[in-house]
Image (spheres, grey):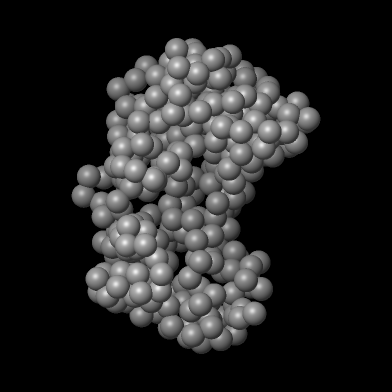
């Protein structure tokens, strides 16, 4: 367990807060938490966390916010409002980490961010990984697979209607819960490791959407059939139901990457990092059964 100050960026987000809870429970640290709005982390400041303001659009102020940290968790930012903004923020953060003397970066990337992937936002992860490769930092790159939690966006409607529409074909995904990603990130940050490693963070198995539909049927007690549509038809349906076209394009891009096999990755990384196996899709949906059922 590391004793050097540990820094968590984006600490007011869902992953960030969970990482802080895990670090505090493990008595790791000291802990530095950065956020655009320090007041949002007042409860953690009261528990001894050094909460600092960090605006990733203000590079000049980042180095001061990162000062004193030995290891840092760079949680990929949510700046997807315009092309190029997120990668600009993350490259600014890497430059600031260097100025602040940080030695090891843990970065939350995404599974298979290769140049040919259909996922429209993977380029930010690929470019951040490339910048880390060219840097002087030791690093741990955590390539998170698709969040199991995202299934709760679509499956309740599928349970209600009996049909789940995607453009995934027979492609599989190693769905991993947001909580397991946070556990992996907290463990990687707290460990006193050196060198460079790239790890795929996944659930215990890669499942097709047909298999997920069968699990949803079992858990809900209602029949659910997966129906794979052509990408354009799926996008048209999303837009018709009120989604902005750019959002529909992004969601469909994930389905196309799923169909091509980019997400068909299952590893034991979570178990190795944390000592506890990741939650399966069935376990997750069982725990959230009430959210699946029609109100």
Q: Residue at x 43, y 52 (%)?
A: 145
Q: Is residue 97 left or right of residue 222?
A: left
Q: Residue at x 62, y 29 (%)?
A: 33
Is residue 102 visible to the viewer in this orientation of the structure? no
Q: Is residue 156 left or right of residue 229?
A: right
Foreground residue among 127 and 111 = 127
As drawn, 87 above or below 219: above
Foreground residue among 278 and 226 = 226
Foreground residue among 10 and 107 = 10
Residue 52: x %, y % from top left: 62, 24
Is residue 232 visible to the viewer in this orientation of the structure? yes
As drawn, 7 above or below 136: below
User: Where does the C terminus fall, quadrant-wise?
Assistant: bottom right
Residue 187: x %, y % from top left: 58, 36
Image quadrant where residue 118 sits: bottom left
Q: Residue at x 68, y 33 (%)?
A: 39
- Give the residue furthest to the left: 116
Residue 192: x %, y % from top left: 56, 24
Q: Is residue 231 left or right of residue 281?
A: left
User: Where does the N terminus fall, quadrant-wise?
Assistant: top right
- Give the residue furthest to the right: 46
Q: Residue at x 35, y 31 (%)?
A: 88
Residue 139: x %, y % from top left: 43, 27
How many tags in the picture?
0
């Amino acid at each position: 367990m590391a004793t050097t100050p540990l820094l968590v960026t984006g600490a007011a987000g869902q992953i960030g807060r969970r990482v802080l809870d895990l670090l505090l429970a493990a008595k790791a640290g000291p802990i530095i938490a950065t956020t655009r709005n320090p007041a949002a982390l007042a409860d953690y400041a009261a528990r001894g966390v050094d909460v600092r303001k960090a605006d990733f659009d203000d590079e000049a102020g980042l180095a001061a916010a990162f000062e004193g940290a030995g290891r840092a968790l760079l949680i990929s930012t949510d700046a997807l409002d315009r092309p190029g903004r997120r990668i600009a923020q993350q490259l600014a953060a890497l430059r600031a980490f260097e100025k602040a003397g940080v030695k090891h970066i843990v970065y939350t990337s995404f599974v298979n961010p290769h140049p040919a992937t259909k996922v429209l936002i993977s380029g930010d992860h690929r470019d951040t990984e490339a910048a880390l490769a060219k840097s002087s930092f030791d690093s741990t790159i955590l390539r998170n697979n698709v969040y199991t939690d995202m299934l709760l966006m679509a499956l309740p409607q599928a349970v209600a209607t009996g049909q789940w529409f995607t453009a995934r074909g027979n492609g599989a995904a190693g769905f991993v819960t947001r909580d397991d990603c946070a556990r992996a990130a907290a463990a990687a940050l707290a460990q006193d490791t050196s060198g460079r490693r790239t790890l795929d963070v996944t659930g215990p198995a890669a499942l097709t959407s047909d298999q997920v539909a069968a699990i949803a049927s079992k858990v809900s007690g209602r029949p659910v059939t997966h129906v794979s549509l052509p990408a354009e038809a799926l996008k048209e349906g999303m837009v018709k139901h009120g989604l902005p076209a750019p959002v529909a394009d992004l969601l469909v891009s994930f389905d196309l990457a799923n169909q091509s096999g980019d997400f068909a990755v299952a590893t034991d990384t979570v178990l190795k990092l944390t000592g506890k196996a990741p939650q399966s899709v069935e376990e997750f949906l069982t725990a959230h059964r009430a959210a699946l059922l029609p109100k």
